[in-house]
Image (cartoon, helix red, strand yellow):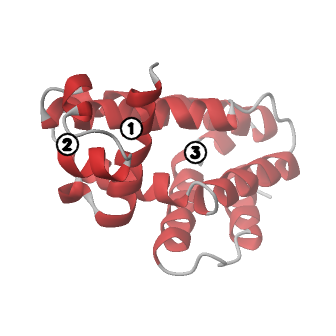
Amino acid sequence: MSSIRRRALDAAITLVGTEGVRALTHGRVDAAASLPPGSTSNHFRTRAALLAGVIEWIATAERAEGGFPGTIDTAEGLVAMLQHALELESGSGATRTRARYALFLEALDEEAAAPLREQRRIFEEWTRATLMRIGGAEAAAGTRMLMATCDGLLLHRVTVDPDAPMDDAIRRAVNAAIGA
């Protein structure tokens, strides 16, 4: 990827994450990235293409930054991994997280939103398999409850209280899912 395209996408994420989707214009991205006027539109001809590019870039950046968790065989390991992920996404990745939420709400084009939805589906499958390994089929049935708990904690941390404690809530949700 060219450095100009990368700078434009990083600036676009910052704009969306700090000012909302309406702030996403080619001109504002050029200015935020300190690029010559027209640079962003050379890479993304339309606003729809820019939105799709930003969505794909968020998914790519999240996969590259956090990798994908390996096999976890214990409830404590799952709690630790989820807490680490939420700390990352509500700390250094908070602007990107806000942008992801805004884009989920605004992305009416299913094709454009596909990278974020696919990433979510993969993580849900991983969580279900991890809960199955730890506590069997009944635990796997708690996948959506556990993910909803984590989603709520993350949303709370990026919108209300960046230092809100998570450990107890995550531990309770994991224990509820595995029946402990």
Q: Quadrant of residue 126?
A: top right
The answer to whether 90 is drawn above or below residue 142 in the figure is below
For image coordinates 47% across by 51% down, the residue present is 96
Which mark is in front, 2 or 3?
Answer: 2
Horizontal side of residue 150 vs 12, given as left or right: right
Mark 3 or mark 2, which is nearer the start of the sequence?
2
The residue lying toward the viewer, choosing from 30 and 177, is 30
Q: Position of residue 49 (x, y in %)?
A: 20, 29
Mark 2 or mark 1, which is nearer the start of the sequence?
1
Q: Residues within 10 Å of mark 2 (few under 14, many from 20)?
A: many
- Dot 3 corresponds to which residue? 143
The answer to whether 133 is drawn above or below residue 30 in the figure is above
- Dot 1 corresponds to which residue? 9
Horizontal side of residue 72 vs 102, given as left or right: right
For image coordinates 76% across by 72% down, the residue present is 168
Which disc is residue 26 wearing?
2
For image coordinates 72% across by 66% down, the residue present is 172
Q: CA distance from mark 2 to mark 3?
A: 39 Å
Q: CA distance from mark 3 to mark 1?
A: 32 Å
Residue lying furthest front: 36
Q: Amino acid at mark 2?
A: His
Residue 101 appears in view: no
Which disc is residue 64 wearing?
none
The residue lying toward the viewer, choosing from 76 and 67, is 67
